[in-house]
Amino acid sequence: MSAAKGIAILGSTGSIGRSTLDVVARHPDRFQVVALTAGAQWQVLAEQCRQFRPRVAVLAEPTHAGELAAALASAGLATEVLAGPDGLVAAATLAGADVVMAAIVGAAGLAPTLAAARAGRRLLLANKEALVMSGRLLLDAVAASGAELLPIDSEHNAIFQCLPPHRPGVVAPAVTRIWLTASGGPFLRMAPSELHGVTPDQACAHPRWVMGRKISVDSATLMNKGLELIEAQLLFGVPSGGVEVVIHPESIVHSLVAYADGSTLAQLGNPDMRTPIAHALAWPERMPSGVESLDMLRLGTLRFEAPDRERFPCLRLAEAAARAGGTAATVLNAANEVAVASFLAGRLNFTAIAAVIERVLERLPAGTAAALEDVMEADGAARRLATTLVDGFGGRVS
Ligand code: NAD
Ligand code: MG
């Protein structure tokens, strides 16, 4: 019998998915790919199947599932092709999927991520929206099943590395503050008057990281850091105000943890997601990721500065949602997903992203988030209202 662990990669055709396959391919003795999933990119998925020969391949968007099945059969593969949301859950809970990489973007990843948590797998969480929108519910599922939750977001993986062993959602003793670093995105120094007219391609041209388009826009508005602040509070059990955002344009220090004795621990590394991915795959061991370690003699200056909440109101909105609790983070996330998709489709100006989210938060006060139904209801209401606002303003909300 093989000693290799089975891994299911949800969102394998995306930026995190491809980085995960890059790391896994370096360690065929340790990992065997058992399931791969994609949204609609069936040709990329077919190519990945030819290389990694999983037992199951899933297309969330079913239109081309027949073509995928035909392509795999003609390549002589026995891979079973599934489609739609049920297929994603089947991949996340597949027998032999010891490790599940949750790397679907947005709320579409919630159901399979939650299913993997309930099934007690080692869950590598890149899909921050799933945690932000469902809050304690995902952590409760992890605690109830005994699943292992390891953060993939580079900042949260860094914080995890700087903390003593702890349970998800429970604060580590004597931690006084978590510093969440932010690159500041492509518009850090742009004049506020110019932000209005920036294009999707400008917003997606991140100075330090190569990522999917949704998270790239979130990085440009600083909503990514707002979502990460909520993510950190949940993962590490720190109260609102216990996490502080600091701009660090070089993206070398991936976050820091301050302790009561005056010590501050940091994790440093080149900005490459294969490092946190390899860390979470091998934990508590370590293994090569393909990323070079830092050359301290060539590093030069590392800068740290306060974020500008006037220029980047999304950070302020996320901080307010974190303080409000309940379904506020669900509403924030849903409104943001609609606004960002509208911006990427050329239907909304960049600065209107924050305006839409602010109006949705004003009109939908936070309710309790005791059950998944509460979360899905708040998510749906926020999406409808955000869509109406975008439509009503003819894409010119400002
Ligand atoms: P991406 O857009 O490159 O990839 C997303 C993946 O999800 C693709 O495989 C796509 O086919 C799939 N997908 C999209 N819509 C889907 C749907 N409706 N149903 C099922 N599958 C769908 O995104 P990414 O940059 O890899 O980010 C993935 C997640 O990881 C996001 O939540 C992001 O915030 C998080 N993350 C990414 C990075 C990064 O460096 N890219 C860093 C930290 C966290
Ligand atoms: Mg991050």
Image (cartoon, helix red, strand yellow):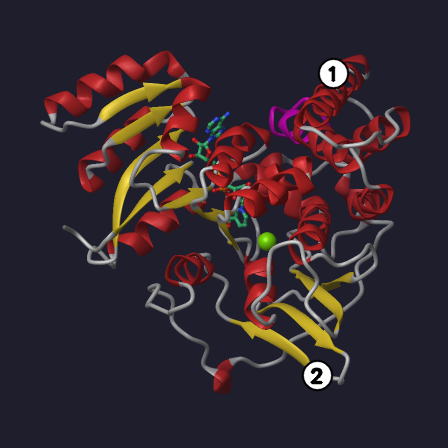
* Residue count near mark 2 (Cα–Cα under 10 Å), binned few <14, some 14–19, many ≥20: few
Front-most of residues 195 and 28: 28
Query: The C terminus lies in which quarter of the figure?
Result: top right
> Image point 35% across, 46% down: which residue?
98
Is residue 269 rendered magenta in the image? no
Amino acid under label 1? Arg
Q: Quadrant of residue 203?
A: top right
Q: Amino acid at mark 2?
A: Ser
Q: Nearer the viewer, residue 356 or 323?
A: 323
Q: Which residue is mark 2?
A: 263
Q: Position of residue 111 (x, y in %)?
A: 53, 29
Q: Residue 256 placed where, x, y %?
A: 66, 71
Numbered disc in front, either 1 or 2: 2
Q: Residue at x 38, y 50 (%)?
A: 19
Residues drawn in magenta? 339-349
Residue 238 placement: quadrant: bottom right
User: Circle 1: is it few (<14), some (14-19), or many (20+) Cα within 10 Å?
Assistant: some
Please indicate whether residue 225 sits to the left or right of residue 397 in the image. left
Give the left or right position of residue 272, taking residue 75 as reference.
right
> Which residue was labeled with disc 1?
384
Please say if the residues under marks 1 and 2 sit with CB atoms less than 8 Å apart. Answer: no
- Of callouts 1 and 2, which one flags the residue occurring earlier in the amino acid sequence? 2
Residue placed furthest toward the bottom = 297
Which quadrant holds residue 265? bottom right
Q: Is residue 130 above or below residue 345?
A: below
- x, y percent for residue 99: 38, 47
Side (left or right) of 274 relative to 26: right
Q: Is residue 345 magenta?
A: yes
Residue 183 position in % (x across, y down) = 65, 60
Q: CA distance from mark 1 to mark 2?
A: 47 Å
